[in-house]
Image (cartoon, rainbow, N blue to C red):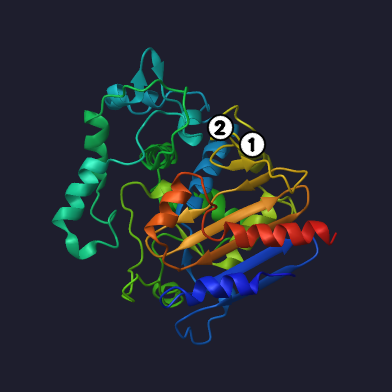
Amino acid sequence: MNIPESLIEKEIKSAKKASYAIGVVTKDSQHIQGQIYDDMGETEIGKSVFEIGSTTKTFTSLLLAKLAREGRLSLDEPIVTFKPEYKNALSSKGKEITFRHLATHQSGLPREDMKKLRKRMKENKQDKDNFFKHYTLDDLHQFYLDFDLKKEIGKKWGYSNIGVGLLGNVLSEVVKMDYEEAIKSHILTPIGMNDTFIHGNEEQLKRYVKPYNKKGERIPPIEIPAVQGAGAFKSTLHDMMIYLQHQMSLVDSPLKEEIDLTHQLQGVKANKRIQMGLSWFIENKKWSSYPLIHHGGTTMGFHTYFGFLKEEQIGIVMFSTIQISTIRLIKMLLGLSGTVNENHAEFVFKEFIQNK
């Protein structure tokens, strides 16, 4: 398997105490390689724990698809059916936000509750590298009680963590479990992802890759108590490669129909190149005859890439702990450059296609 080692090495060397690992899954083989800054003892790279960030959203939407297929809810059912107290926040100009709107970022809700987040960060400056830690379920509840939605629902795409966070919480209430338990019970355990979690045990936490900030100081594990469905899960390459196998139908999956539903185009464009599945970004690339389905994740310490070409039967998961410049971050947010690790993944995809 051709991995762009020189490009990765360049990024690692320019960062402070950085680690990376990449896993590639095809119909015929699996490949793992990486470099962890700290001594992980006997822990192999494939079992090292990292934060998957917003790739968590694909778990949330898979649970949504499962409950929809079971008839426990409808994708186009208004959220106010379950949260009538949030009516002002979840309705605008005669329309109501549905499950589908939340899963495709067409709700019109803001990205975050920035006013309260700034307040919590100001009150807890010691946790500057863990700024969701002190944003509570009560804060989220108050946001939805107070917020008056002005934007038109279903008209414009706008990425919303607070929207997918609500989605995860409502789905958890439907199945009468907390969010982590709901995802484990309905999604992870059935497909054998037993090393993926929000609150790990002592043994799992010992395998946690340590990320560092630009000053070389350790960044603590992420804590997102209020909007877990938007980005709270941690995993390993081994587990996420199992997820790739199920996403690409390389194994018989108990969630095949649900997974296929999340891959269906929803008639929503994030931009000129990218359409939405349920949480998934479905992108047309010039170098591929088939769409690339992907979702990355960024936390204070980790950058995760997760993507696959279903028809080509190749998928990639990669994480790194490099620190990025403000300029690079702005370019990423504006769509002027790829996300961290995206270029490395695309190198592997292109090499695989060319060498078939």
Residue wearing tag 1:
261
- Res 298 → quadrant: bottom left
Q: Are marks 1 and 2 in contact (CB under 8 Å)?
A: yes
Residue 25: x %, y % from top left:
71, 62
Q: Is residue 38 left or right of residue 130?
A: right
Tell me what residue is drawn at x 74 percent, y 57 percent. Answer: 350
Pick the residue in front: 282 or 139: 282
Question: Which residue type does callout 1 highlight?
Answer: Leu
Q: Is residue 42 left or right of residue 242?
A: left
Crowding around mark 1 (Cα neighbors within 10 Å: few <14, some 14 to 19, many 20+) is many
Distance from Cα at disc 1 to Cα at disc 2: 10 Å
Q: Quadrant of the N terminus?
A: bottom right
Q: Using the image, tell me which numbered label, if any, was put on residue 138.
A: none
Closer to viewer: mark 1 or mark 2: 1
Residue wearing tag 2:
68
Residue 36: x %, y % from top left:
50, 79
